[in-house]
Image (tube, helix red, strand yellow):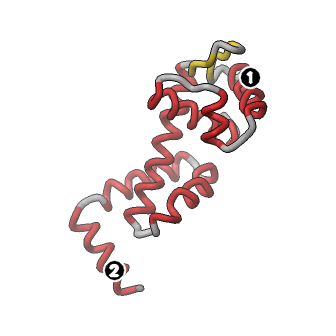
Amino acid sequence: MPTPTMEDYIEQIYILMETKGYARVSAIAEALQVQPSSVTKMVQKLDRDAYLNYEKYQGLILTSKGKKVGERLVYRHELLEKFLRIIGVDEKNIYTDVEGIEHHLSWNSIDRIGNLVQFLEDPERSKELKDFQSKKD
């Protein structure tokens, strides 16, 4: 299982691959706000752990294992953002809050939050939640 730092890299590489079709060390470094040398070290580790294939000066591609993990990590991030929006967290706090909690929840918790999000997406339930919250504010 990847560490939280490895997860951040895999997630970002997956996003870059999906949006641009490629992921370069410089783009990963910029997105994660780290030095390119740090990216190179992590990419080499991810290559050793079979999350991606990396050839120096040639680029990298996610393995099927890396794609599967990346897809799940993006799902987790997007789900938590959606959940926080539904429960009324201020938009300016959502990204930071998700970054702060996403590595600390089990996949069982993520699955239960997914069920709750589906439940709360019903317009009537959503209205009830907003009405309840307005009484508490």
Relative horizontal placement of residue 100, taking residue 78 as reference (left or right): right
Q: Position of residue 41 (x, y in %)?
A: 77, 28
Q: Residue at x 35, y 86 (%)?
A: 135
Q: Which residue position holds label 1?
A: 44
Q: Residue at x 53, y 20 (%)?
A: 64
Furthest residue toward left: 124
Distance between mark 2 and mark 1 Cα atoms: 50 Å
Q: Position of residue 78 (x, y in %)?
A: 45, 48
Work out whether residue 72 or residue 28 is closer to the camera in this orientation and state it.
28
Structural crowding at the residue carrying mark 1, measured as other residues with C-alpha within 10 Å and reported as few (<14), some (14–19) or many (≥20)? some
Q: Which mark is residue 132?
A: 2
From the image, state whether disc 2 or disc 1 is nearer to you.
Answer: 1
Q: Position of residue 38 (x, y in %)?
A: 77, 34
Rendered view: 84 above or below 23: below
Structural crowding at the residue carrying mark 2, measured as other residues with C-alpha within 10 Å and reported as few (<14), some (14–19) or many (≥20)? few
Q: Residue at x 26, y 67 (%)?
A: 125
Work out whether residue 73 or residue 19 is closer to the camera in this orientation and state it.
19
Relative horizontal placement of residue 41, taking residue 51 as reference (left or right): right
Pointer 2 with pointer 1, Cβ within 8 A: no
Q: Secondary structure at mark 2?
A: helix
Quadrant position of residue 127: bottom left
Q: Quadrant of the N terminus?
A: top right
Quadrant position of residue 59: top right
Work out whether residue 19 or residue 1 is closer to the camera in this orientation and state it.
19
Quadrant position of residue 49: top right
Q: Position of residue 45 (x, y in %)?
A: 74, 25
Rendered view: 114 above or below 123: above
Q: Quadrant of the C terminus?
A: bottom left
Question: Which amino acid type is marked by label 2?
Answer: Phe
